[in-house]
Image (cartoon, rainbow, N blue to C red):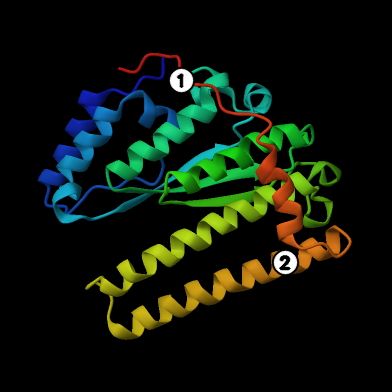
Amino acid sequence: DFIPNRDAITELWKGLKGLGANFIGTTHMTFSAVAADPELMRQISSINKQDETGRWLATNLGIETVAPNMVKKHLGVKTRPFAPEEWGSVVREGAKILNENHWFPAATIIIGWPDETPDDVQYTIDMMSDFREMNFRGLVAPLLYQDFSEKNSMHFGNLNEAQFTLFWKCWENNLRVINDIIPIILRNKTYGPPMKVFMYGILKAGTWAIMRYLRGLCKDLFNGRTPDEIIDKYARSRSVSAPKIQTKKL
């Protein structure tokens, strides 16, 4: 039934912590598991004393898409124990729970599925707008769809307006979040001054270069139009919205 085994997981966390570790992290989680049992996140964060120390831990999660039609076709059991139609709300709720418990999500989405329509993309654009409103602290990496067949793979030159808007929204989010966490990095006593300066420079230069590239790409793809002209169309659309979670939590 894909419901997290809270007792087994918390016992594992306690056991590893008891061996002398400062904290216990994990490379990957799923939004469905987080949303299914918010108390589990609270307990493992408490074991790590994240609420006391203010330490944030990062973990990787896959969103891929929140369009119900695409979720049903492509995500398989990723949404369990929730229904595919609930995935958009599951992701939003999971992101909120993670942030409340000092976890920093590094999430992925996929752009350019072969059967993807602008309406499908709008679901995920709306999610990114909601992330902004909820002051989501996490990164969203937009990945271009890659297929075993090159002709079915997505390339930057094939992005339509909706797909470009989603790509831009992801990096707009990342730029906002990176600017927010730079002061945290500078206050971190783990890094010496030279490393702090290096990391600051890399983060600022990297995000500036990406946004500059996207501005140029937009002009190349859409007859000289700017990102603001393209994005405004989809920001106002709000043609779809995520369904509310109906499945009962633990």
Q: Residues within 10 Å of mark 2 (few under 14, many from 20)?
A: some
Q: Which residue is mark 1?
A: 245
Amino acid type shown at disc 2: Arg
- Residue 128 vertical placement versus 54 (above, below): above
Q: Residue furthest front?
A: 236
Q: Quadrant of residue 53?
A: bottom left
Pointers 1 and 2 in contact (CB under 8 A)? no
- Place of residue 194 in the rendered image (x, y in percent of width and height, measured from the top left): 34, 85
- Residue 57 vertical placement versus 8 (above, below): below
Task: Residue at 15%, 39% (x, y): give it.
Answer: 15
Kind of element beneath mark 2: helix
Task: Residue at 19%, 34% (x, y): give it.
Answer: 43
Quarter of the image that includes the C terminus: top left
- Residue 162 vertical placement versus 4 (above, below): below
Question: Any mark on residue 99, and which?
Answer: none
Q: Which sits earlier in the primary sequence, circle 1 or circle 2?
A: 2
CA separation, marks 1 and 2? 37 Å
Q: Which residue is mark 2?
A: 215
Kind of element beneath mark 1: loop
Task: Residue at 70%, 64% (x, y): give it.
Answer: 214
Q: Quadrant of residue 111?
A: top right
Q: Quadrant of residue 3?
A: top left
- Place of residue 86 in the rendered image (x, y in percent of width and height, measured from the top left): 52, 22
Q: Residue furthest bottom?
A: 194
- Place of residue 33 in the rendered image (x, y in percent of width and height, measured from the top left): 38, 28
Foreground residue among 110 and 117: 117
- Residue 243 vertical placement versus 15 (above, below): above
Amino acid type shown at disc 1: Ile
Quarter of the image that includes the N terminus: top left
Q: Is residue 105 left or right of residue 163?
A: left
Q: Residues within 10 Å of mark 1 (few under 14, many from 20)?
A: some
Foreground residue among 90 and 150: 90
